[in-house]
Image: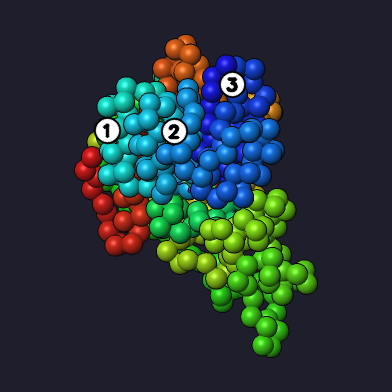
Amino acid sequence: MLKVAIVGAGSRGIWCFGNLLSQRDDCEITAICDTNKFRGDVAAEKLNCKKVYTSITEMLKHETLDAAIITTPDAEHEKCAIELLEGGVNILLDKPLSPSLQGCKNIIAAMKKSGKIAMMGFNLRHTAVLKYLKKLIDDGALGRIILMENREFYEGGRTYMARWNGKKSSSGGLWIHKGSHDFDIFNWFLDFPKPKKVSAFAGMSYFTPQNFPFEIESGIAPGPCCADCHYGKNGSCPDRVIHEGKEWGKEAQALDGYVKDSCMYLSDLSCHDNGIAMVEYENGVRASHMECFVCGISDRRYSIVGTKAVATASLTDRQIVVVNRWTKEKITYDFPVEDGGHGGADPHLLASFVAALKGENVPKATLEQGLLSTAITEAAELSREEERTVFIEL
Ligand SMILES: NC(=O)c1ccc[n+]([C@@H]2O[C@H](COP(=O)([O-])OP(=O)(O)OC[C@H]3O[C@@H](n4cnc5c(N)ncnc54)[C@H](O)[C@@H]3O)[C@@H](O)[C@H]2O)c1
């Protein structure tokens, strides 16, 4: 039995990795570590784990672990990863590696010094559609890749404005927090060439106080959070966020002030609700990523242009269509629905990490690859802020 700790017992810690670990017969959840004691206790109860800690330091004093899975907010990744690696623990680190390039370098240095296994949680690489698209690219079915595009519509993403995800201090910004997935996929498709320059445009077009989707009654201000908002309670706000678990209730909030249902229309404007970011690689390939959180649908759609054929793909439709440039022959590949979070990707991600722990494979997504994704997305944040093209220095 591999002894695994979950560090950061929130949505991802409990509902993804906690549940998946509980279903495996080769892993046990040895300890839960969350800086919020209330949330840690709730997670331990849900996952039937007896040991709860509020710091990694305490946990390492008492436990001998084979691995830890880090699912804290992004800005905490660096210190958690370094402490665990220095404590001799293998880690799976949810994306992004760190919101800053320097943070990524510091984690990589700690990993090298420790000799431990460290893997990135880039679960998109485990979706059936993208695995097959990667195979088509590697097999040369599209020819030499010259241009790539990805459009993400994410209905759930609008709630980023309601919690830490949209705050630069916690996530580095949404290019980093969300776009890190998408630029990792571009990097992976191309076998990780060096990115040369990035330009990005992004802004908060809708989730601002000018756009409340209800009539404001005289003298009754909206917010500050959905649970306490007059317009949430009386049902007039269609964007009301409801978190039913007690881990997000007032008792947990009292310990650290973490509110997961802040009014989206009063959110931090350093965050964007839509944008476009482009990268050009040293090998001449160009790629653009559009993300939008003001929408009622969720899908990632890809266009990959090669010298022989163009592939288009949709994660929601679970389909790839390849059209040959000369013959116009069209081949359609359909993929069955899979169980498990993120279109079946999460169980495969965990299985890949466990196999690496057992020495059966090497980590699928390395920290160095995590750094490349942060390098691009950090540059996209800077490009947006300073309204210029940013040249990447690694
Ligand atoms: N791969 C994916 O598809 C995917 C999806 C969602 C989130 N994520 C990533 O997963 C991570 C967690 O996101 P979430 O939505 O579950 O967050 P969350 O807010 O639901 O939970 C985070 C938890 O971490 C705890 N925490 C904060 N600092 C800590 C520290 N120093 N040590 C221990 N615990 C700490 C908080 O108290 C909270 O309980 C983030 O890095 C996010 O980017 C990945």
Q: Which tag, 1 or 3, sits closer to the chain's start?
A: 3
Q: Nearer the viewer, mark 2 or mark 1?
A: 2
User: How busy is the neighbourhood of tag 3: few (under 14 within 10 Å), some, or many (20 plus)?
Assistant: some
Q: Quadrant of the C terminus?
A: top left
Q: Residue furthest right?
A: 234
Query: Residue 325 or 286: which is nearer the viewer?
Result: 286
Badge number at residue 61: 2
Kind of residue indicated by mark 1: Ala
Q: Nearer the viewer, mark 3 or mark 2?
A: 2
Snapshot quadrant of residue 341:
top right
Kind of residue indicated by mark 3: Cys
Tell me if 329 is positioned left or right of 269 in this view.
right
Q: Callout 1: helix, strand or loop?
A: helix
> How is the structure coloured here?
rainbow
Kind of residue indicated by mark 2: Lys
Do the residues under discs 3 and 2 have CB atoms within 8 angstroms?
Answer: no
- Taking 294 as reference, is 125 above or below it? above
